[in-house]
Amino acid sequence: MATSTNAVLCFLLLLLLLLLPLSNNAATIEIVNSCSFTVWAAWASTSPKTGGGNQLNPGQTWTINVTAGTDLGRIWARTGCSFDRSGRGNCQTGDCGGVLQCQDYGRPPNTLAEFSLNQFSDLDYFGISNVEGYNVGIAFSPTSGGCGGVRCSANIVGECPAELRAPGGCNNPCTVFGTPQYCCTDGTCGPTVYSRFFKTRCPDAYSYPQAYSYPQHDETSTVICPSGHNYKVTFCPINNFIICIQLNRTDLGSSKSWSVGGY
């Protein structure tokens, strides 16, 4: 009887040890809406195939739990959405098949926070992409020290080339033109005038499809961290601020302004 009990205990201990690394390396990702408008946050991954969605009013947060080993994960903001009580509807940007709870990637244009957790050598990979265009600024970083973060927050929608403009965002050239030059579907391709438009304004972000396959083309866009970190994604991060102080000089009949910039 004692031998049987010891065998069961040993089996349970072994099972616990096998499951423990998975538990330790699972991550939480806090998604924060710092925009002055409502967004409908979304996430999806292909391995495992899962995802979700949530309405975030200005200042609200949503925390998702991501299992260890999750690959090809994306987080993005949807804008201009309308959903009924059953969760069916549509969004102007980032729509994922007309549902609130996304299980598939969103429709361009949408700025992407991308991640793969607990991959080769127990490492996490994450970054920001404009390959699908741009709709809302994003910052993506670990919540603890040891690894840096990335951000993309620029006036891309306002400065978007006329041929890439879309309601609520700035499209990627592959969606607009559909040619191998921009979609990288016919052998090796490189940066274009349109990818440079995005890269100049968001140097942290991927700007064309083949940059994923050939990291030497875009070495600045992927952050690698030891597995075990938790993360934070912020929509509309504060990029900088300008304080203007105006003093009216009535005695001189003029005014002066000073500005102080910061991050």
Image (tube, rainbow, N blue to C red):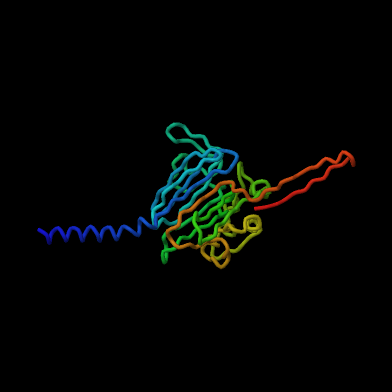
- How many circles with numbers are drawn on the protein? 0
**Residue 224 placement, left or right of 200:** left
Q: What residue do we see at 55% from left, 40% from top?
A: 59
In the displayed image of the protein, which residue is found farthest to the front?
A: 251
Q: 46 left or right of 7? A: right
Furthest-bottom residue in this view: 216
Q: Residue furthest right?
A: 252
Image coords of residue 183 (percent x, y) = 56, 57
In the figure, 52 relative to 131: above or below? above
Taking depth in this image into account, of 19 and 115 the one nearest to the observer is: 19
Q: Where the N terminus falls, by quadrant?
A: bottom left
Q: Position of residue 104 (x, y in %)?
A: 45, 47
Q: Is residue 216 above or below residue 141?
A: below
What is the x, y in percent for residue 102?
A: 45, 44
Residue 18 locus on image (x, y percent): 29, 60
Residue at position x 11%, y 60% in the image: 2
Front residue (pair 146, 95): 146
Q: Residue furthest left?
A: 1
